[in-house]
Amino acid sequence: MTAAGRRKVVTWAREAAGLSERKACRLFGVSRSTVQYRSVRPADRELRARLKELAEERGDWEKAAEYYARFVELWVDADPELQPRVQAAQQRLEEILAERG
């Protein structure tokens, strides 16, 4: 189960049974630090919106998407520890292309 899934289970137990965080975590064997974790990574939505805005202003959205696709392609054979990032970049590219239609 992912960390996000563990957080949801603990949150559900707290709300449904009125348990404290400590008791809910102990019940499900989840570390309290996992439940209390808050990402420090900035939201991707704002960045994508700004990049989209810049590409539309300059009128070369297709060219920007093509270059991003080439960049992602170069990293397909990267080291195994980088593969999760490569897959995330591929997924972002697919999302961007789907948004654009």
Image: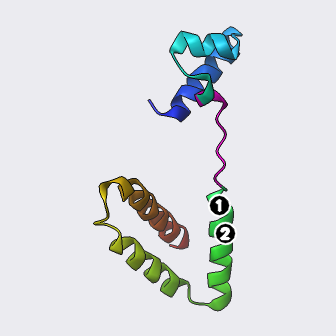
Camera-side residue: 54 or 42?
Answer: 42
- Expressed as whole percent of the image width and height from the top left, the position of residue 57 reads 68, 87
Residue 49 marker: 2
Magenta stretch: residue 10 in it?
Answer: no
- Expressed as whole percent of the image width and height from the top left, the position of residue 68 reads 46, 77
Residue 75, by quadrant, is bottom left
What's drawn in magenta, residue-wise? 34-41
Residue 80, by quadrant, is bottom left
Please give the name of the residue rendered at 68% of the width and 73% of the height, measured from the top-left corner.
50
- Give amino acid for label 1: Arg
Please give the name of the residue rendered at 52% of the width and 14% of the height, measured from the top-left corner.
28
Are the residues flagged by discs 1 and 2 in contact, CB closer than 8 Å?
Answer: yes
| Horizontal side, residue 87 vs residue 39: left or right | left
- Expressed as whole percent of the image width and height from the top left, the position of residue 27 reads 55, 10
Residue 96 marker: none
Mark 2 residue element:
helix
Residue at label 1?
45
**Quadrant into which the N terminus falls:** top left
